[in-house]
């Protein structure tokens, strides 16, 4: 839904020409992500001066690389393994639970080329979270990092997963670095548990796939993806909602291909095909990095530097020092962490053109200092899983507006809707509604929840913003009780549900509180059950949560109360607790002289 140039109800359209953005969205050249990946790899294998498409760098600087032609051939082999060896039908859901590494693009691209549906899964998920997601998606095939193979017996017992493929961190590394890393993992850090269930190593799966293609006389996997169109389902990207129940956003091939075009249109003034080198510290299983870093920079023929684990932030040092980084993506926490590293401030990346911030609010002080240290702009954007994810972005031409999430991308229409269902006037707050080719098809097997957020093609985001006369947006509040910890979504109901399972807890409420390091932190307020003897200890609540929740969802603080504030009908009033926590935080900052 494209706005006419100069439409006063869509003031951002008049800004496009001023900042070097084409106002009309260029349609994708390909019908599917399989075709997109194949043609991009073939093109840049011929044209790119850089030999490497992806390089994985571990903290000590050891690394491995794959070229564009290798990525194309290896992902073809994995696609054939899925379709011929495992006999998966088109549309079968394949869970990929891998950190950033060379295995990730090979496997993810292979799933898409096979015409299957990619289900991205955080490698740090607990058994509880894995089992829920795999059962909800109907996953039968799992590709897992071998460091967490100890979870497999229980996962297989409680899900439909029947096929397991294991990959390692140093997958595709040269022999000597690979042997050293595996030796350290086995002997020194002891992070490789024994595997007690039937499985296939990735290398063996690829061998089987290659043989299948050769036997059929095929040189590509086009016969798997040639029939796919924009409306076909490509991914189930899991997110939460107002209920806190994790659910899969159905993202089509067209959703993702259009969003790549939108991202490239917004960054066109600073991007050159075959010349870019992007640092990927954000996890590729997160929709931000998946679309921007993996797909967007593949389209540009960029050299993609993959960081398996960005914590501590010093893990990035060798990558920053050894490669000509021209682009970075990250969240406020990552940028702030780098600015507090002596090595980064002393020797910032010399080739850097610009950086992209998303996932959570970018603090103004971080944006200002980043520009001072690197001499380059850092631009904030806005998106969500349900929009593939990019909705708006700060143009890089000129100076990005600090505190703004920018203007809508070409092909995107935005309304700010009041509580009365009317459009908010310029400068007045309203809920962001999004319309565009990147908006999801709905939530997997959840028609009721889909109907709550999709209204005649418009996505109600739950985020409240104001728009100025130039069409620039600024987030002012969240309609939902979503907590964002270092760019990751935490849904209070999910945490509350886990805590409520404790016999010693009578009532619980979970909110987000301000945190200088992570943007927000999870805080739980609990009331002790008098029928359960002894005092309720905060550390017991935290320990309980660690058994069922990923680390970023575990409460950083637990407050024991005699009672919780409630409405007349007995509903716990989170807003009262949030106001109290905000006042506490402000008082602490004033006392510290900030």
Image: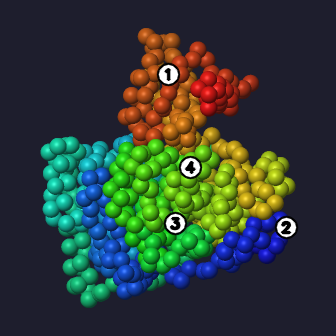
Which residue carries the number 2 mark?
8
Q: Are marks 1 and 4 in contact (CB under 8 Å)?
A: no
- Nearer-N-terminus badge (3/4): 3
Which residue carries the number 1 mark?
505
Q: Is residue 315 above or below residue 214?
A: above
The mark lying in front, picked from 2 and 3, is: 3
How far is mark 2 from mark 3, CA to CA? 33 Å
From the viewer's perspective, tell me whether residue 148 is left or right of residue 496: left
- Out of 563 and 560, give the one closest to the viewer: 560
- Nearer-N-terminus badge (2/3): 2
Which quadrant holds the N terminus? bottom right
Residue 246 seen in the figure = no
- Nearer-N-terminus badge (2/4): 2
The mark lying in front, picked from 2 and 4, is: 4
Give the residue drawn at x 61%, y 17%. 563
**In which quadrant of the rendered view does residue 7 lie?**
bottom right
Which residue carries the number 4 mark?
369
How crowded pointer 4 is (Cα within 10 Å; few <14, some 14-19, many 20+) is rated as some
Give the residue drawn at x 79%, y 66%. 10
How crowded pointer 2 is (Cα within 10 Å; few <14, some 14-19, many 20+) is rated as some
Q: Is residue 430 above or below residue 413?
A: above
Q: Secondary structure at mark 2?
A: loop
How far is mark 3 from mark 4, CA to CA? 16 Å
- Nearer-N-terminus badge (1/2): 2
Q: Position of residue 178 (x, y in %)?
A: 19, 60
Which residue carries the number 3 mark?
353
Direction front: furthest residue: 346
Which quadrant holds the C terminus? top right
Give the residue drawn at x 40%, y 66%. 324
Q: Secondary structure at mark 3?
A: loop
How far is mark 2 from mark 4, CA to CA? 35 Å
Q: Position of residue 463 (x, y in %)?
A: 68, 49
């Amino acid at each position: 839904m494209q706005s006419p140039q100069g439409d006063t109800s869509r003031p951002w359209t008049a800004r496009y020409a001023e900042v070097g953005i084409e106002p009309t969205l260029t349609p994708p050249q390909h019908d599917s992500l399989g075709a997109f990946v194949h043609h991009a790899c073939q093109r840049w294998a011929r044209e790119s001066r850089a030999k490497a498409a992806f390089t994985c760098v571990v903290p000590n600087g050891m690394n491995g690389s794959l070229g564009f032609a290798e990525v194309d051939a290896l992902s073809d082999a994995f696609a054939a393994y899925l379709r011929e060896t495992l006999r998966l039908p088109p549309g079968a859901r394949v869970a990929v639970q891998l950190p950033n590494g060379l295995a990730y693009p090979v496997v993810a691209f292979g799933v898409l080329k096979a015409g299957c549906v990619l289900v991205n899964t955080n490698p740090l998920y607990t058994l509880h979270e894995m089992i829920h997601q795999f059962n909800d998606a109907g996953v039968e095939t799992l590709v897992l990092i071998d460091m967490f193979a100890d979870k497999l017996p229980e996962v297989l017992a409680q899900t439909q997963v029947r096929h397991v493929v294991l990959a390692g961190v140093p997958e595709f590394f040269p022999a000597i670095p690979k042997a050293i890393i595996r030796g350290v993992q086995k002997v020194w850090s002891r992070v490789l548990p024994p595997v007690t269930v039937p499985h296939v190593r990735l290398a063996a799966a690829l061998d089987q796939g290659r043989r299948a293609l050769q036997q059929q006389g095929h040189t590509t996997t086009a016969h798997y993806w040639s029939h796919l169109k924009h409306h076909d389902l490509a991914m189930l990207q899991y997110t939460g909602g107002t209920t806190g129940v994790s659910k899969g956003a159905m993202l089509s091939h067209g959703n993702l291909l259009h969003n790549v075009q939108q991202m490239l249109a917004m960054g066109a003034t600073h991007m050159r095909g075959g010349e870019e080198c992007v640092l990927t510290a954000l996890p590729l299983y997160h929709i931000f990095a998946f679309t921007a870093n993996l797909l967007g920079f593949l389209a540009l023929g960029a050299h993609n530097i993959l960081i398996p684990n960005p914590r501590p932030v010093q893990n990035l040092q060798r990558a920053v020092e050894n490669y000509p980084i021209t682009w970075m993506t990250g969240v406020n926490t990552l940028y702030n962490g780098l600015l507090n590293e002596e090595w980064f401030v002393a020797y910032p990346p010399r080739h850097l053109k610009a950086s992209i911030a998303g996932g959570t609010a970018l603090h103004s002080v971080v944006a200002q200092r980043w520009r001072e240290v690197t001499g380059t702009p850092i631009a904030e954007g806005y998106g969500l899983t349900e929009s593939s994810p990019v909705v708006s972005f700060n143009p890089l031409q000129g100076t990005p507006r600090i505190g703004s999430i920018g203007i809508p991308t070409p092909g995107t229409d935005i309304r700010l809707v009041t509580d009365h269902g009317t459009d908010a006037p310029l400068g007045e707050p309203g809920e962001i509604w999004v319309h565009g080719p990147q908006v999801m098809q709905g939530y997997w097997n959840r028609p009721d929840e889909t109907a709550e957020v999709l209204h005649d093609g418009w996505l109600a985001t739950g985020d409240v913003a104001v728009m100025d006369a130039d069409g620039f947006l600024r987030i002012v509040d969240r309609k939902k009780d979503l907590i964002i910890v270092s760019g990751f979504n935490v849904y209070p109901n999910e945490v509350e549900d886990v805590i409520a399972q404790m016999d010693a807890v009578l009532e619980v409420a979970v909110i987000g509180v301000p945190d200088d390091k992570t943007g927000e932190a999870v805080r739980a307020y609990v009331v002790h059950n008098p029928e359960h003897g002894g005092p309720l200890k905060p550390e017991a609540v935290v320990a309980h949560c660690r058994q069922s929740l990923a680390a970023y969802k575990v409460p950083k603080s637990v407050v024991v109360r005699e009672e919780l504030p409630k409405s007349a009908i007995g509903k716990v009033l989170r807003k009262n607790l949030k106001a109290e926590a905000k006042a506490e935080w402000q008082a602490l900052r004033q006392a510290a002289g900030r």
